Image (cartoon, rainbow, N blue to C red):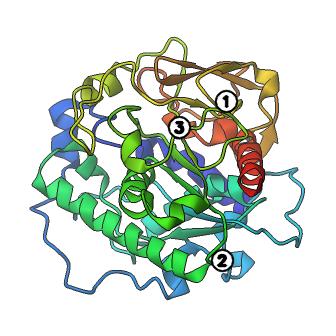
């Protein structure tokens, strides 16, 4: 079952990547916008109609779910089993967009196709943290992918509703875990957007900030000047630093990130500062440093589809990476991950898969640093 579901991840990732962010994926012009815009105007749902996060059914992963229902316990083939040793940290993971219809602005929690896709992302992304932590991944009324192609009141309200669910899930998460337990925060694409806001509104300046091992805000552009200060956490400068932020966007050569830069430059951060070219946070996930380069042999493992794309193996030494003007340039013997590379050689779809083993190692190092 896990192998088949991993195959489904590969099949749907290209469509899901379009949902990443209107600031990133306006590559289809007015035709794409018209074809993707949700029908009608945003209509607020009935009061108190959101998910009850006291109910385990509203979580894709949490430690009290049975293993067969906990998507975060997935491992690539050949990996050693997790065993029974206690994991004394907790990860809060926010999945990317998985609702691909245009009949509404926010996904319903009973929409089975989008929920299956969300489970797949938790398997292939959040699982990187399952060696050191229990994982909590909420279901939420995510903004439909068309909301990311627009910058209007309807899209803003849809994103606000999605974030409201995430924020309430985070409150429940904090109430459920021990008050001194270290916390890892992670997300991708739409999930990373909500995570950046969560850091600014629920973590910065609060006691919980001292419990943050690291925040993996992956697949979303962050400005060092306009975005990072609002989070209350510094960029991760080295692999043995805790309480910091990591972010990267993966490209292969020849890279053309103009689609991102043209939409991102000049927009404003939380405190009104404008985002500028050359001011984008890039963490090298292999080295765990702000900027820098690493050869392929230093990469402990990329998720590579195997057995006719029916499973995935963790293959070391394939992909190197270096930060270049805010983007993560990948190189080496890049394996065939699937046919879903975006325009400009953008490997957004594979931001986690390329560095799954490195993310796993990074989390272990930062948790050790937090304990020290």
Q: Picture coordinates of residue 62 (x, y %)?
A: 62, 75
Q: Is residue 225 left or right of residue 31?
A: right
Q: Nearer the viewer, residue 137 or 75?
A: 137
- Is residue 1 visible in the rendered structure shown here? no
Residue of label 1: 336
**In-front residue for pair 125/225:** 225
Cα–Cα span, label 1 and label 2: 30 Å
Disc on the earlier residue, 3 or 2: 2
Q: Position of residue 152 (x, y in %)?
A: 12, 49
Residue at the image position 27 percent from the left and 40 percent from the top: 269
Q: Which residue is mark 3?
A: 235
Element type at marker 1?
Answer: loop
Q: What's the CA distance linking mark 1 and mark 3?
A: 31 Å
Q: Are marks 1 and 3 in contact (CB under 8 Å)?
A: no
Q: How many marks?
A: 3
The dot on residue 85 is none
Classify 10 Å Cα crowding around label 3: few (below 14), some (14-19), many (20 and above).
Answer: many
């Amino acid at each position: 079952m896990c192998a088949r579901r991993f195959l489904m991840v590969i099949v749907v990732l290209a469509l899901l990547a379009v949902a990443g962010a209107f600031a990133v994926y306006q590559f289809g012009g007015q035709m794409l916008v018209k074809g993707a815009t949700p029908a009608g105007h945003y209509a607020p749902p009935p009061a108190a109609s959101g998910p009850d996060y006291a109910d385990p059914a509203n979580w894709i992963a949490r430690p009290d779910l049975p293993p067969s229902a906990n998507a975060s316990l997935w491992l690539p083939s050949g990996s050693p089993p997790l065993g029974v040793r206690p994991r004394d940290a907790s990860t809060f993971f926010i999945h990317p967009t998985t609702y691909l219809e245009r009949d509404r602005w926010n996904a319903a929690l009973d929409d089975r196709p989008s929920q299956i896709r969300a489970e797949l992302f938790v398997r292939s992304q959040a699982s990187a943290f399952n060696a050191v932590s229990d994982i909590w991944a909420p279901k939420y009324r995510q903004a439909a992918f068309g909301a990311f192609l627009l910058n209007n009141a309807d899209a803003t309200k849809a994103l606000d509703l999605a974030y409201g669910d995430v924020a309430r899930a985070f409150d429940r998460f904090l109430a459920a875990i021990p008050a001194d337990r270290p916390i890892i925060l992670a997300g991708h694409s739409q999930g990373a957007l909500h995570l950046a806001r969560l850091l600014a509104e629920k973590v910065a300046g609060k006691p919980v900030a001292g419990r943050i091992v690291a925040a993996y805000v992956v697949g979303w552009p962050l400005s060092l000047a306009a975005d990072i200060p609002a989070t209350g956490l510094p960029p991760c400068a080295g692999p043995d630093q805790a309480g910091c932020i990591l972010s990267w966007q993966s490209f292969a050569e020849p890279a053309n990130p103009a689609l991102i830069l043209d939409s991102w430059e000049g927009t404003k951060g939380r405190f009104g500062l404008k985002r500028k070219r050359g001011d984008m946070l890039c963490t090298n996930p292999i080295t765990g440093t702000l900027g820098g380069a690493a050869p392929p042999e230093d990469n402990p493992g990329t998720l590579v589809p195997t057995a006719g794309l029916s499973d995935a193996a963790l293959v070391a030494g394939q992909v190197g990476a270096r930060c270049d003007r805010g983007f993560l340039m990948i190189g080496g013997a890049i394996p065939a991950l699937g046919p879903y590379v975006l325009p400009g050689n953008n490997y957004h779809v594979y931001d986690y898969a390329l560095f799954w083993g490195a993310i796993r190692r990074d989390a272990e190092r930062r948790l050790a640093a937090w304990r020290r």
